Image: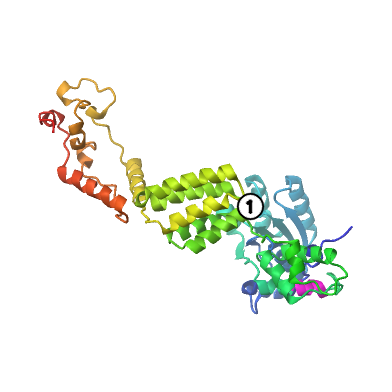
Amino acid sequence: MRTPLAFSMRPQSLQEVIGQRHLLGEDSFLLKSVEKKIPFSMVLFGPPGCGKTTIAEAYAKSLGFHYVSLNAVTCSKKDLEIAVDEAKIWKGAVLIMDEVHRLDKTKQDYLLPYVENGTFTLLGATTANPYIALSRAIRSRCKILEVYPLSQDDVVDGLKRAISSPKGLDGKASFSLDALQSIAKLSGGDLRFALNILEEAFVQYDGQEEIGAEQIAKLRSVPNYAMDKDEEEHYDSVSALQKSIRGADVDAALYYLARLCVAGDLDSIKRRLLVIAYEDIGLGNPNAVMRTQMAIAAAEQIGFPEAVIPLGDAVIDLCLSPHSRSGDESIQEAMAFAAKMPFRVQDYLKLTPVSLREEDKYPYDRPDLWERIQYLPDEFADLQFYKPHPTSAYEKALLQNYERLKKQGRSSRLAELKKRKPE
């Protein structure tokens, strides 16, 4: 059975790990731990293919410890029991747990005492933010280490090593530097992805004197974006899209939109653009908000790839439009107030008021009085949630009307108001 190149090239020690100089530089914590043979339980987190599991295995091998590898998605309680029994046989054992954040509470509780008493050293690997995805009990017993995406130079170094290594292609193929750089650019910092392209190119163009960038382009044209909805990169890209629009950086916004479009994530794009339109543009340009809704409807009808056209128009429109967060800020302030200060609705505003004199009832037949009625109770009558941001002609007009109504004043004495002659 063929061993995939990405697997056969796994390092046997920390010194063989590609990149991650912040973790593996001279006098680093990991190297000191290996040197003194003092293991630590750790959680390694970062995007796919950056070397989390590789570092965990290399750490165990460098320590000279027996290790067991499991995946939290597929392992059962029985698998954990077998791993614990195996660890008890060895003096110093390591349990490597991929996707550690997927362990349910029962399994986490089962592992904790064995981590605590040193039966084994736990090395967890996860693409999720451990400060959000992992239980406090696991985090408190582990050192948290972030593993970064590899740089393009790191990926090129890894590819060169794979080409020349007896465990790799063993010099049976020649790649131009441009070809290796093209693979590195496509990889998105994922060495495993890059090694798969390298092996694919070797199989496709075996016998060719030198494989160049042109051949790589024929194999792959879509970059490797970590856009699974369960991955951190997905949420980061959605967040970056909103922040770019909020900051009116149209080129950055188009880039992050393109990343989501390349991944085909229309659902996230639709939801986020609507939120952005109402939250960040809002009353600054209501027409842009409506145009965004129309663009989303068009994108749904068209589907990818052409859906990128209306979506791109919407992003440009939102970026360069007058912005106003007054609507969002106002309702958030009102929500916070309502949550802690409930009050009884005045009798004249109730749907069916009981025992209320006719002259004190709401005047349905006097629209000229509606703007003069006090709708908040006396103790909160002067409360102001709406803080205008007059960034556009539209909101300036709203502000003028708002100030007119404030100056005019309101009253809760409906009987007196009704004595006014209709205007």
Segment tinted magenta in the rendering: 158-164
Which x, y percent locates residue 139? 59, 57
The residue furthest bottom is 26
On screen, residue 51 above or below 372: below
Question: Does the magenta-highlighted stretch encompass residue 159?
Answer: yes
On screen, residue 208 above or below 239: below
Q: Mark 1 points at which residue?
A: 228
Question: Does the magenta-highlighted stretch encompass residue 59?
Answer: no
Q: Residues within 10 Å of mark 1 (few under 14, many from 20)?
A: few
| Nearer to us in this view, 52 or 275 | 275
Residue located 76% across and 46% down the image: 78
Label 1: which secondary element: loop
**What type of secondary structure mainly makes up the magenta span?**
helix
Quadrant of the rendered image containing residue 206: bottom right
On screen, residue 210 above or below 412: below
Quadrant containing the N terminus in the rendered view: bottom right
**Residue 50 is at least partly visible in this image:** no
Quadrant containing the C terminus in the rendered view: top left
| Nearer to us in this view, 325 or 82 | 325
**Colour option used:** rainbow
**Residue 299 is at least partly visible in this image:** yes
Residue located 21% across and 40% down the image: 379
Which x, y percent locates residue 402? 23, 46
Q: Is residue 282 left or right of residue 39?
A: left
Residue located 61% across and 64% down the image: 143
On screen, residue 217 above or below 263: below
Q: Label 1 is placed on what type of residue?
A: Asp
| Nearer to us in this view, 334 or 147 | 334
Q: In this view, does 168 lie to the left or right of 147?
A: right
